[in-house]
Image (spheres, rainbow, N blue to C red):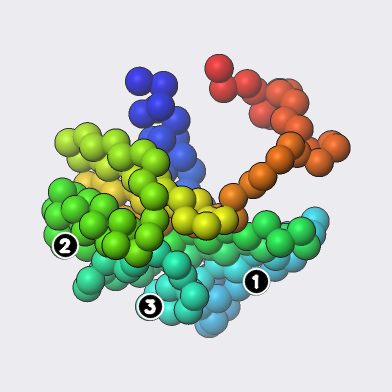
Amino acid sequence: MKTIHSLLYSITCLTITCISSSCIFWGCTNSKEVTYDSGGVSQTFTVGKQAVPRSFPLPIYPNAKASGSVSAKTDDDENSTFLMLSSNDSVSKVAEFYIRELKQAGWTISENQLLASLVNISGKKNDLEASVMISAAGNNTSISLSVNKELVGTPKEGQAFTPDKLNPPTD
């Protein structure tokens, strides 16, 4: 149960980030891509058809519509990309596609949670980790794809998580 709540919380946060970013794009500029650098991290927000990064390593569901993406790169070569898609197909049909295509592309599926209206698939390939979250969204199916470089080893000094008022412990 804790895993489901954590997963739903993550989906909600990522969706809010994408929607907020979209509002900023349309309100502040005619461009559909915005990049900013802060604290050694370069973040790029993109909306619309061009949201799918050229070198995105995960399969893109056929006829899915891209709504937005967020890419983050650090000075230490820690990269991650998050992509939001939508489809008119059912959650189960989209899930079958991703399970099949990830395996065919050489991804090792490490987790596959199937619920009635929510699917979470996690995988690994070489030094990459991926997450595919598929959920019912009204008459559509929401597809959230994320890829990041696998973090190996222990955090650098000063990077370890310490709970405080703004970041309480999750347990």
Q: Dot 2 lies on which element?
A: loop
Residue 33 locus on image (x, y percent): 55, 76
**Local crowd size for mark 1, using a 10 Å CA cut-off: few (<14), some (14–19), many (≥20):** few
Marker disc for residue 35:
1
Residue 27 or 63: which is nearer the viewer? 63
**Local crowd size for mark 2, using a 10 Å CA cut-off: few (<14), some (14–19), many (≥20):** some
Q: Which residue is mark 2?
A: 88
CA–CA distance between discs 1 and 3?
17 Å
| Amino acid tagged 1 | Thr
Q: Mark 1 near mark 2, Cβ–Cβ under 8 Å?
A: no
Quadrant in the rendering for residue 85: bottom left
CA–CA distance between discs 2 and 3?
16 Å
| Amino acid tagged 3 | Lys
Residue 112 locus on image (x, y percent): 31, 40
Q: Residue at x 38, y 35 (%)?
A: 8
Q: Dot 1 lies on which element?
A: strand
The answer to whether residue 7 of the structure is visible from this angle is yes
Q: Residue at x 46, y 51 (%)?
A: 124
Q: Residue at x 48, y 65 (%)?
A: 69
Residue 14 locus on image (x, y percent): 47, 49
Q: Residue at x 63, y 60 (%)?
A: 79
Q: Earlier in the sequence, mark 2 or mark 3?
A: 3
Q: Which residue is mark 3?
A: 49
CA–CA distance between discs 1 and 2?
31 Å
| Amino acid tagged 2 | Asn
Left or right: residue 94 compared with residue 47 = left
Q: Earlier in the sequence, mark 1 or mark 2?
A: 1
The answer to whether residue 20 of the structure is visible from this angle is no
Q: Dot 3 lies on which element?
A: helix
Left or right: residue 56 compared with residue 109 = right
Q: Earlier in the sequence, mark 1 or mark 3?
A: 1
